[in-house]
Every structure is written in structure tokens, then in C-alpha cells.
Image: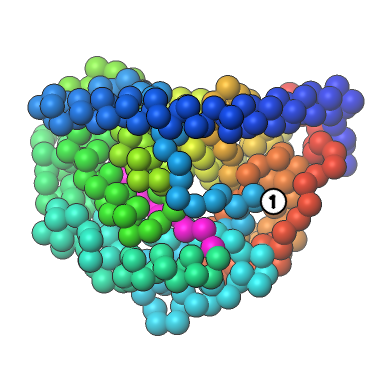
Amino acid sequence: MATVSDLDRAALRAQRLQLRRRQVRRRRLTALAIVAGIVLVSVFAGRLVAGSGSVSLRPDRSAALVSPFHSTLPQEIRGVHVSMDLAGIPGKLSSYLALRKDGLNTIELDVKDEYGEVGFVRGAPALAAGDGAAHPYYDARAVAARVHKAGLYLIGRVVTFEDPVTATAHPAMAVRTRSGSIWRTNGGLAWLNPYSRAAWRYDVDVAVAAAKAGFDEIQFDYVRFPSDGDLADIRYPGPHPQPMGETIAAFLSYAASRLHPLGVRVSADVFGLSGNHDLGVGQYPGQIGEVVDTIYPMTYPSHYGSGEYNLRDPSAEPGKTVAYSLRDFRTKLVGTKAQLVPWLQDFSLGRRYRPADVLAQVQAARDYDAGGFMLWNASGIYTAKALAPGPPPPLPPLYAPHL
């Protein structure tokens, strides 16, 4: 296996030292930022109310980190995704909480999923209840209390713009076609219009409901423009003079302006390839990193094509694929406040993924000094040994640059 050069090692050490220094400076400035930030966020939120529903589409940097958070972030996130369906099965949540003995310290639970469903009824926004989107998969307050009693950190996943329930019930908020009908993906799912202020307000209302129930962090997924279906047939109603990337950053800034004062962190999922490609969906890590607390790239090796990072089959070399991807994200996030935590592949696609493949990805995340990692498996079956705590790497990663 090729190793990095001495120059690469020195550069990475310098980068880590720079990151540590920035973290220390941020801690010292937090007390002052709390007072000043609350005032600035009040002004930003006031524009939403007083301006006849108008919201500036420019990312508002004053929305970032404006209040103390009500929970402590794990030193290394080691988490798994749990769907609302699984959480609704009696006894199933207990099986995930039991993974704490293996090293689990974080659970990400669906609050609003790809199908527009909200996982709880009590406390759900009136719009969700009225449209039939709210379902009693779990009681949000009770789940938050159980997760915290087990000593775990709780993230709420809010699928943002893919929402067939709300888009169908409220066509004025939906992405449309040239003929004026509701646009749909290849799978038949409708989307909310990312330019729609009403859509922004609804998604963040759902997030606020979870925050008030006790969730520690809200992670926005599908926070982008559509990527599959007849994209040429898409029409976005209303004004949209700014670039896509600016719109996504502005939405997240608005979300932070409402969630940070509640003591809740704000994060975003992004495509793994957005670290080195413009995918045309408005996901620009540098812009997003300016307004969120954590950015979660989906670095699933099976999603990278042959030749990416000069690897013939990225799926067959999961450690290298994740490492190269995180290196690109590190470059994009220089100068931003966002922590980097990758989603790792714990499922089989194209070939069978074994524990060694998952562990290779975990090691890559640690090599690149990520803030931890999250495991994804839609079926909810996870590699327990991958959750074991690990020491910080003594040396830079042993992967040669591909350029």
C-alpha cells in the first residue's frame, strides 16, 4: 500500500493543529457570541414575520452558533440511523439502546421521512396533523427521555424538500412541471419547492417540534434540489433570482435562527460527491459549512463510480474511498465552523459488505480526524464491533494523494 509523503504528513499535521487552535478560539468567544448572536438572530427572525413572509435569500452568518446547547456533543460520534417504522415496533428501540455496551453513543431517528410522514402526533405542527402526515410511530418526548436516560445523544432526521404528502396537499408549495402539474421523481414522489418560504416554514416547524420534545440536534436530509426524474420539465413557482447553492445555505441559516435559540444543534446531509463535484443540486459544502454545526457527507463507497479517485472499483476499497472523500471535504470546509462527520456504508450494494469493510471506513474517518461517524443501513441491522471506541490516530492517514 502506498504511503503519504513526508510533505503530506506535515501538511496534515499543520491542518490538524490549525483546527485545534480554531476550536479553542471558538470556545473562548462563545460567551460573547451568545449575547450578540441572540440579538442578531432576533432581528433576522423578525424579518421573517414583519416582511410579509419574505426571507432574505442570502446566507445569514449571524445565525450560526447563537446560544448554548442543552446537551454535550460526544467527543467521537458513533451512531446509527433508526427509521420511524422500526422505532414503532414494540421493543425495537430497546435493541438499539442496548448497543451502548458495544460503544454506541448516538441515535439518529426519523422525524420526517422521504415519504413526507412525521413520526409522532403529539406536538406535531397543525399542518402535518391536518394533512394526515403525522403518524403515531412513537411519542417524541418519551423517546427523547428514554434515549437520554440511556446516556445517548439524539439526532432528529428531517427530510426537507422531498415530501409527497405536503406537496400534493399544497400544490402552491410544490415543484411544478411546464404544464403546471405537480412534478414527480422517477419513483413518483413529489417535492416541495426549495424557493418556497412556506415550505421553509413548515420543515422548520417540524424540526422545532422535535427540538421542543427534547432532541439534541436536527439533521436536515434531502436539503437540496431534485436530482432524478425529468429535470428539464421542472418549473419553480415564484421568484428565484439567486443561485441554488445560496438558496440552500439561506434555508439552513433560517433553520439555525429558530433552532439555535432552543439549544439545539443544526446539521445537514450532503452527497459524498459534493466534496469534489458540482452536482447541480445546490449543495456546496463551503457555503453550508458557514451556517451549520455539523456536515454529514454520505460517503458510501458503492455510490462512487469506477475511476473516482483513480480507483478502479471504489466499492471494493472502502477505506481509501472514504479517506479521499473526507480529504476533499476537509479542503472545502477550511475556514468554516462546521464539524465533519461522515455517513458510512453498513449495507451491501453491488457486492457483499463484511465487517472488515465497515471497519476500514471507520478507520478512515479516524485517520482524517472526523468528529465521529454514523452507520447507515435502511434495514436497521448494524455491525456492532464497528461502534467500539478507538484512540485518535498517532499519524496521518496512509493513503497517497490521487492527483
Mark 1 closeness class: few <14, some 14–19, many ≥20 residues within 10 Å: many
Tell me which residue sits at (33%, 25%) in the image: 40
Q: Nearer the viewer, residue 241 or 54?
A: 54
Tell me which residue sits at (20%, 28%) in the image: 46
Magenta extent: 152-161
Q: Horizontally, is 364 left or right of 77 in the view?
A: right
In percent of width and height, residue 361 lies at 69, 51
Q: Which residue is mark 1?
A: 361
Q: Is residue 248 visible?
A: no
Q: Above or below — where is 69 with respect to 39?
A: below
Q: Is residue 260 visible?
A: yes
Tell me which residue sits at (47%, 58%) in the image: 154
In percent of width and height, residue 247 lies at 32, 27
Quadrant showing the C terminus? top right
Quadrant showing the N terminus? top right
Element on which disc 1 rests: helix
